[in-house]
Amino acid sequence: MSARREGRYSSIARRWLALVERRQEHLIELTETGRWRHYYTKAEFRDEVNKILRVREQWAEIAGPSPHGEDGSMDDEDRSPMPEIRAVRLPAPLWDD
């Protein structure tokens, strides 16, 4: 079975994924510090968290697997500076339902 080839836009998709992950980290920080209350209602923040998780999943699917090996090292064929695709980190529960 052949391995998935790098598409023309794979590096762009990985960069968009990195941007979405930075946004996700920001929402996690807002959750941990409680600052989300300054910017959102509970419903708005819940919707924002759900949206970012959905968008991250879509970009991860588009970007495909990382060209780096399991240990994070780069293959000899690809020496471009790509952002690392990290696992999803979910925020802690915000409130009891």
Image (cartoon, rainbow, N blue to C red):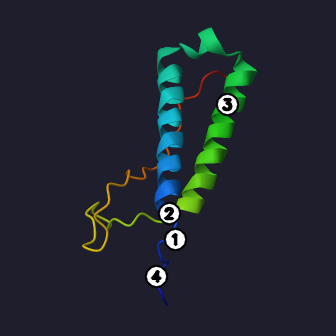
Marks 3 and 2, the one that precedes in the sequence: 2
Q: Residues within 10 Å of mark 2 (few under 14, many from 20)?
A: some
CA gap, disc 1 to disc 4? 12 Å
Number of residues whose C-alpha sits closer than 10 Å to that of mark 1, classed few (under 14), some (14–19) or many (20 or more): few
Residue holding disc 3: 48
Side of 4 where 69 appears, left or right: left
Q: In the image as oriented, which residue stretches furthest toward the bottom?
A: 1
Q: Amino acid at mark 1?
A: Gly
Name the secondary structure under disc 1. loop
Residue 66 in which image quadrant: bottom left
Residue 93 picture location, percent across and down:
58, 28
Q: Which mark is residue 7?
A: 1
Instruction: Provide the secondary structure element on which disc 3 rests.
Output: helix
Residue lying at the far top in this picture: please name it.
38
Label 2: which residue? 10
Q: What residue sits 53% from the left and 60% below the top?
A: 63
Earlier in the chain: of badge 3 and badge 1, it is 1
Label of residue 82 in the image: none
* Residue position for label 4: 3
Badge nearest the viewer, 3 or 1:
1
| Residues at marks 4 and 3, CA–CA distance in whole angstroms | 35 Å
